[in-house]
Structure formats: C-alpha cells, structure tokens
Image (spheres, rainbow, N blue to C red):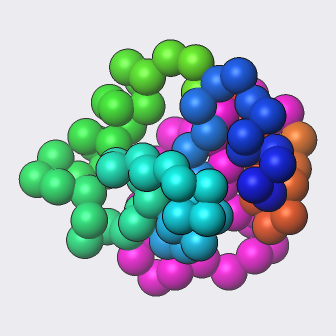
Amino acid sequence: MDEFIEKQEENVYILDSNAAWYMIPIDRYNKNYDMFLIGNLGYKGEEGQIENLKNTTNKIILIRKDEISRNWQNPEKVREYIKNNMTPIGEIGIFDIYK
C-alpha cells in the first residue's frame, strides 16, 4: 500500500476509519480523510465532505470494497457519491480505487 500511495502523481485519499494505519508510516496526513467517521466530519457533515471532494483536483480515492464490512460510523452518503460520480480504476488490498 505504501508503495502504491508514494508512486502516484495525484494525491491519494483513503476514505476509511483505518486510513491513518497507512498514512502514518509514510508521514502523510490528510485532515479531512484520515479518521473518516461521521463524528469527525465537522459541522457540514457528509455534505461538506462531498463538496470538498468536488473541489479537490488531482486526486485518487480509495474506499473499502463492498464485500468488506465497514465501521458503523462510515459516511455512506460520501461513499455513494464516489461510486456514482467517480470512475473506478482498480483495486488494492481491501480497497476499490476511484479517480
């Protein structure tokens, strides 16, 4: 996973409650995404995160595959936005990759 993230020209965001497990060892911090739980999204909540994604260019997004269980606080609206509005380009480990 580290190698995948580090070799990308785009910014890689893992929208998952466990994102920090992957980001800390490579000394990266993505404030809005590394503890991706409903309780950590700020006052605009999921709608605010969707707006952030719309306004962020040069990005690759990783979300858990459908068959892998997610934390009960996973922002499902954001996940659906990604699946409906971004292009799947592959998978790595337990994640689907979107651009």
Q: Is residue 10 above or below residue 38?
A: above
Specify the quadrant that holds the C terminus.
top right
* Residue 60 image offset from top left, x and y in percent: 65, 33
Give residue 51's position: percent from left, percent from top: 32, 30
Q: Quadrant of residue 53?
A: top left
Left or right, 33 with respect to 42, comes to right
* 82 vs 13, nearest the viewer: 13
Q: Specify the segment rendered in magenta.
A: 60-89
**How many numbered dots are placed on residues in this image?**
0
66, 5: nearer the viewer? 5
Q: Is residue 93 left or right of residue 35?
A: right
Q: Does residue 88 sit above or below 54 in this rendering?
A: below
Taking the spot 34% from the left edge, 32% from the top edge, the residue there is 52
Can residue 79 be seen from the camera position used here? no
Say which residue appears at 33% left-offset and 50% top-offset. Answer: 31
Q: Is residue 91 above or below residue 18?
A: above
Judge from the rendering whether residue 63 lies leftward or rightward of residue 56; answer left or right: right
* Residue 64 shows in the view: yes
Residue 75 in magenta? Answer: yes
The quarter of the rendered structure image containing the N terminus is bottom right
Where does the image place residue 39, in percent across and percent down from the top left? 25, 71
Identified at 80% across, 67% down, the residue is 94
Residue 74 highlighted magenta (yes or no): yes
In the rendered structure, the answer to whether residue 47 lies left or right of residue 77 reads left
Q: Position of residue 14 (x, y in %)?
A: 59, 53
Residue 95 occupies which quadrant of the picture? bottom right
